[in-house]
Amino acid sequence: MEMKQVNAGKLRAIGYDAGARILRVEFDDRRLMEYAGVPQECWRRLSTSGSMWSYFRDTIEDEYTARRIK
């Protein structure tokens, strides 16, 4: 999965697999999390948001099943 480097709050990189509907997020502490079932529209809004960290916290963090992969 291609990761897009960002500097938004605690987010350092984000990536998305449209086929699997998986969002991958790297945090500033190097933690890597995957969120399952994320619609492509959420990815589009996150990746183009002027406030990625707020959008992630408000819309994704507690709404989708997460697993730590690193």
Image (cartoon, grey):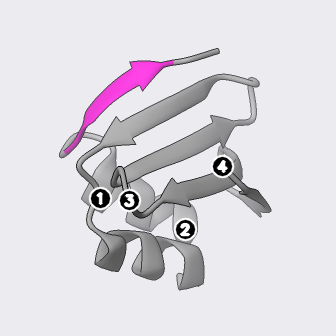
Name which of mark 4 and mark 2 comes first in the sequence.
4
Closest to the observer: 46 or 55?
A: 46
Closest to the observer: 17 or 11?
A: 17
Task: Report, in whole angstroms, how far the alpha carbon at label 2 lies from the one at label 1.
Answer: 10 Å
Q: Nearer the viewer, mark 1 or mark 4?
A: 4
How far across and down, in percent of the image, does residue 68 sit?
49, 17
**Pointer 1 residue:** 58
Q: Nearer the viewer, mark 4 or mark 2?
A: 4
- Circle 4 packing at 10 Å, graded few (<14), some (14-19), many (20+), is few
**Pointer 3 residue:** 19
Placement of 61 over or under 33, stated as above or below:
below
Task: Report, in whole angstroms, how far the alpha carbon at label 4 lies from the one at label 2.
Answer: 19 Å
Q: Amino acid at mark 1?
A: Asp
Which residue is at a point 31% across and 53% down the rendered structure image?
60
Q: Amino acid at mark 4?
A: Met
Q: Specify start and end residues of the magenta stretch as a single range.
A: 64-68
Q: Does dot 3 land on a helix, a strand or a loop?
A: loop
Label annotation for residue 52: 2
Label annotation for residue 1: 4
Task: Report, in whole angstroms, how far the alpha carbon at label 3 lies from the one at label 4.
Answer: 11 Å
Closest to the observer: 65 or 2?
A: 2
